[in-house]
Image (spheres, rainbow, N blue to C red):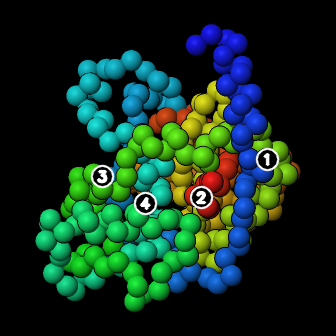
Amino acid sequence: MPYPIKVVLLAILILLAPRSPLGAYDAPENPAPHPFKYATDTFSFANETVWNYVDGTVQKESDRSKTEKRDYTRRCFVVTRAAVQFWKFAKFEPELPPLAPDLLPDRIRQVTDIDVWQPPLPPGKRIAFPGYANLRDISKVNASVFQANIGLGWPVYFRAGNMPIIVPIGRDTEAELNNEIFRDLQMNFPTIVWLYNFPSLSINHVLVIISGTHTGDKFHYKVYDPNYATGPRNLDFDVPSRTFTYQPTFYFKGGPVEARAIYRGVLQ
């Protein structure tokens, strides 16, 4: 694309981008019935990366990596959103017989058709999944069915909430977000957070913040990283510098990141 056209497009995006990086935030008035727990409220499968990462750097495909199929990719937005949707809108009934296989896809889509920013449903109105104790159990047995029905990856590229990536985030805004995250956790609510470094995009990923502690000038958070299915990862916030830092992973070398809460409303 010619450079003048890039400049024009960038200017248009800046004009269209919302002025507030965080957008509207409505603190929950009442606690959620139960906190989001990694062991029960996450998927048994992982989102995979398109590229072959080793210690945060893209590497050439090795003989081993060529044999490891990466079919379920570019779904970090989808997986995190769906996990929170199941936490808010589904219930599990292990004492009952499982659904017939042909009924499960429609039941999954009933959950993911509800906007994730809606408040949790009361027990009597939640969508039932008999035969299993929790999301992790049912998605382990029916991984391909869930992958095919919780959402496509490509539509997230056209989210209205993507445009603010080009608007720099101030340190005060990050401090405000940290306060909101920690406040919501006290009410049992997780926060879906988009981590990125723009324009380098050394990281461009979505997590669910599920628990946190505060010691001195540091906030320590446990997060559900959809690129892992083996346990939570660590995200920290430093009060003096007002900076979020994500731990090293196989796809990110670790270090400071910009954080933005997403899926709080139509434009986020």
In the image, taking residue 258 as reference, residue 38 lies left or right, namely left
Question: How many labels sit on residues?
Answer: 4
Residue 170 visible in image: yes
Residue occupying image coordinates x 61% and y 43%: 162
Q: Which residue is mark 1?
A: 19
- At label 4, which amino acid type do we have? Ala
Question: Does 6 appear above or below 266?
Answer: above
- Of tags 2 and 3, the one toward the viewer is 2
Q: Could you tell me if the residues under marks 2 and 4 are in contact, i.e. CB atoms within 8 Å?
A: no
- At label 2, which amino acid type do we have? Val
Marks 2 and 4, Cα distance to the nearest angstrom?
16 Å
In the image, taking residue 256 as reference, residue 60 lies left or right, namely left
Instruction: Tell which circle, 4 or 1, labels the residue nearer the N-terminal end.
Output: 1
**Residue 82 — which label?**
4
Marks 2 and 3, Cα distance to the nearest angstrom?
24 Å
- At label 1, which amino acid type do we have? Arg
Disc 4 is placed on an element classified as helix
Q: Quadrant of the C terminus?
A: bottom right
Question: Does 118 appear above or below 1?
Answer: below
Marks 1 and 3, Cα distance to the nearest angstrom?
35 Å
- Of tags 2 and 4, the one toward the viewer is 2
Question: Does 193 appear above or below 110?
Answer: above
Task: Tell me where residue 134 appears, x and y as whole percent.
Answer: 33, 73
Residue nearest the viewer, comparing 124 with 171: 124
**Residue 147 — which label?**
3
- Of tags 1 and 3, the one toward the viewer is 1
Residue occupying image coordinates x 62% and y 48%: 161
Residue nearest the viewer, comparing 30 with 265: 265
